[in-house]
């Protein structure tokens, strides 16, 4: 267990400090918290949660959206103070952990991946010392919680006053990690949900990628819609789609990679997703 973790936990029932004893965390008063492969398990692991595979990452391997997330978080990690405490909520297979090598980094998830430091459903239990975190990261996590407004309310107390919440959240991205995919939010909703939790938007950008969206339309048609048609028409459609694919490929090269822009301007109506920096008031 990371020493940094023990420092920022306290028993949610009695407020006492934890110590590690007989393979468990105990405050000496309340029922102890089990450790699984050295990971404290504060909430039951959902039985229907299918663990994600560890995928090879890097240039040319990531989706354009994830590559954009990485650029954004890399910038933010460079801005954050060395030694700052970072809690990555919904960290999964530790996709972005390496970006925070200069900081003290803790990974939280509902599933005990080897890359995770603590398993905890913050909507059910909050064992963190209030204000312990300088930075909280929600990288493509908000769409996977049933109530994002309630979740931001549960996350905000972890941040010290003036601390930052870094969010990446998709808008035009297909349903993924089913059945744990609950919502897509506009930046208006992200702004108002943050405000309810005492979080002020300090920076907001949309990620736009027309070539990616065209590719998604093609893939949707080819992989999912085509089989709906009778065989004769399917053959004609498949041939037409092959031509379209070539055309779209060339167009994609001309269009180039995606870009970030301020979504508050009316001429940017269709982001793939948003990158947000919230600052905790106070
Ligand atoms: Zn206790």
Image (cartoon, rainbow, N blue to C red):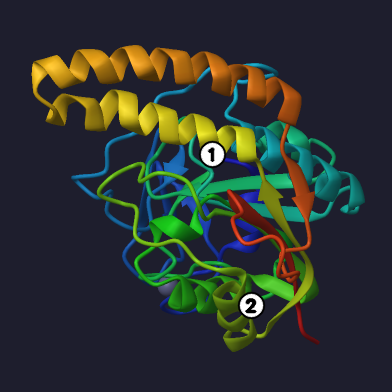
Residue 196 quadrant? bottom right
**Where does label 2 land, which residue?**
191
Q: Could you tell me which residue is drawn at 39 percent across and 62 percent down?
A: 183
Q: Does the residue labelled 1 lie within 8 Å of ligand 1?
A: no
Residue 176 quadrant? top left
Q: Can residue 49 be seen in this view?
A: yes
Residue 143's place in the image compared with 156, above or below, is above
Residue 135's place in the image compared with 57, above or below, is below
Q: Could you tell me which residue is drawn at 54 percent across and 39 percent down?
A: 213
User: Along the line of sight, which residue is nearer the eye, 268 or 230?
Assistant: 230
Residue 219 quadrant? top left
Q: Position of residue 148 (x, y in %)?
A: 46, 70
Q: Nearer the viewer, mark 1 or mark 2?
A: 1
Q: Is mark 1 on a helix, strand or loop?
A: helix
Q: Quadrant of the C terminus?
A: bottom right
Q: Where is residue 165 in the image (x, y as percent from the top left)?
A: 70, 64
| Residue 213: mark in rendering | 1
Q: Distance between the residues labelled 1 and 2?
A: 25 Å
Q: Where is residue 200 in the image (x, y as percent from the top left)?
A: 74, 80
Q: In this view, does 250 lie to the left or right of 19?
A: right
Q: Could you tell me which residue is drawn at 66 percent across and 85 percent down?
A: 198
User: Along the line of sight, which residue is nearer the eye, 44 or 143?
Assistant: 143
User: Along the line of sight, which residue is nearer the eye, 269 or 207?
Assistant: 269
Q: Could you tell me which residue is drawn at 10 percent across and 16 percent down?
A: 231
Q: In this view, does 276 lie to the left or right of 236?
A: right
Residue 12's place in the image compared with 93, above or below, is below
């Amino acid at each position: 267990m990371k020493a940094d973790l023990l420092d920022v936990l306290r028993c949610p029932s009695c407020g006492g400090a934890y110590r590690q004893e007989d393979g468990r965390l105990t405050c000496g008063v309340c029922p102890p918290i089990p450790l699984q492969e050295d990971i404290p398990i504060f909430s039951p692991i959902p039985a229907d949660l299918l663990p994600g595979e560890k995928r090879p990452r890097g240039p040319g391997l990531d989706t354009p959206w994830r590559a954009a997330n990485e650029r954004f978080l890399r910038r933010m990690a460079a801005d954050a103070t060395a030694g700052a405490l970072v809690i990555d909520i919904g960290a999964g297979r530790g996709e972005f952990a390496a970006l925070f090598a200069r900081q003290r980094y803790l990974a939280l998830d509902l599933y005990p991946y080897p890359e995770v430091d603590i398993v905890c459903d913050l909507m059910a239990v909050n064992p963190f010392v209030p204000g312990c975190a300088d930075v909280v990261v929600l990288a493509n996590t908000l769409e996977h919680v049933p109530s994002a407004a309630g979740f931001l309310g549960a996350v905000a107390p972890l941040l010290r006053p003036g601390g930052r919440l870094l969010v990446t959240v998709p808008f035009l991205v297909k349903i993924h990690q089913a059945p744990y995919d609950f919502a897509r939010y506009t930046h208006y909703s992200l702004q108002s949900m943050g405000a309810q939790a005492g979080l002020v938007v300090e920076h907001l950008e949309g990620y736009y990628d027309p070539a990616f969206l065209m590719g998604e339309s093609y893939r949707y048609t080819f992989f999912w819609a085509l089989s709906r048609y009778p065989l004769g028409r399917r053959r004609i459609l498949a041939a037409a789609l092959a031509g379209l694919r070539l055309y779209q490929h060339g167009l994609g090269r001309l269009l180039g990679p995606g870009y970030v822009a301020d979504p508050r301007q009316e001429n940017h109506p269709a982001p793939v997703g948003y990158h947000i920096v919230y600052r905790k008031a106070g």
